[in-house]
Amino acid sequence: MVRIRELMAAVRKRFPDDVFFTSGEDSLLGKLDHYKTYDAALMCLDDGSWNILKEKAIQNFPAERKGQTKQPFFNLLNEAFAYQYLLRKGLKNVRFMKEDGIIKTPDISYVEQEMKYCEVKSIGISDDEIKRRYGHDLDGQDFDVPDFYRLDFFDGKAHTRLSDGFLNKLLIDVNDAREQIAAVKGTGIVFVLARFDDFTRDYIETYRAQLRKFCDAEKDVVLKLEYMGNDIIGS
């Protein structure tokens, strides 16, 4: 796992007091499929794109989401999945873009007869799911989880369909991505990696049907369902 190890070493050097990537983590790398999955995507990047994404990820390494340690960092790495997708589609000159500093540029440029752009978004598990799994709110305050909300008592019916809240968040993210592409007077696709509260994937077929309907209505959107595997829905 060449690039994951390179990234971990760079993070340790830049943030020596952060214990997330300790030397003990190395012994886990061969066992954790998600690291292998990320590394496979990162290995697709050309050297210039890798350097851009690596530096962006390192700069954002200290950022955290309560209940989801280092999620902003891994969200940035999710951009490699979009790059991988574009390559597999046979598109040319796929490159990460340097941030402008004034205009918030799209993440990736590519050529499909003409120059186009891809903006990448990630949707993680909901705030309610964080409360349910970890027993604290997003300010880090612990609370007693009622029996009806505890993991061993939780009514799985809440996961049978993607909620209106999830679909509304998805639409907001897609529109925000379109604005970033429009800011450079371009066209292209929005690539979204979505993680679901239902980690068992019991209702994934229902989710797929809902998301296909979303993509039919919202053109030029590609959805990757979870980071493992190649479960992708496109417009």
Image: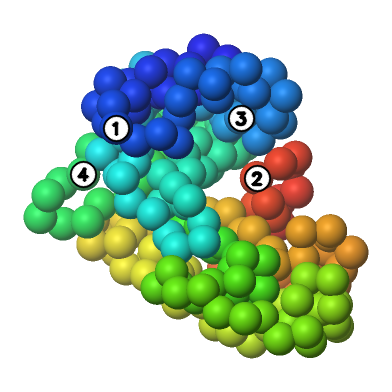
- Residue 51 figure quarter: top left
The amino acid beneath tag 1 is Asp
Disc 1 or disc 2, which is closer to the eye? 1
The amino acid beneath tag 4 is Glu
Disc 3 or disc 4, which is closer to the eye? 3
- Measuring from the top left, give residue 205's x and y in whole percent: 87, 65
Q: Residue at x 33, y 59 (%)?
A: 181
The amino acid beneath tag 2 is Tyr
Q: Indicate which disc, 4 or 2, sits on the residue closer to the N terminus.
A: 4
Q: Are marks 4 and 1 in contact (CB under 8 Å)?
A: no
Task: Read off the residue under disc 4.
Answer: 99
How far apart, in angstroms, are the residues tagged by discs 2 and 3? 10 Å
Disc 2 or disc 3, which is closer to the eye? 3
**Residue 124: in sight, yes or no?**
yes
In the picture, the disc for residue 191 is: none
Q: Are marks 3 and 1 in contact (CB under 8 Å)?
A: no
**Residue 37: in sight, yes or no?**
no
How far apart, in angstroms, are the residues tagged by discs 1 and 2? 28 Å
Q: In what quadrant of the picture does the C terminus appear?
A: bottom right
Disc 4 or disc 1, which is closer to the eye? 1
Task: Read off the residue under disc 3.
Answer: 35
Q: Indicate which disc, 4 or 1, sits on the residue closer to the N terminus.
A: 1
In the picture, the disc for residue 17 is: 1
The amino acid beneath tag 3 is Tyr
Task: Read off the residue under disc 2.
Answer: 227
Please tell me which residue lies in front, 33 or 85. Answer: 33
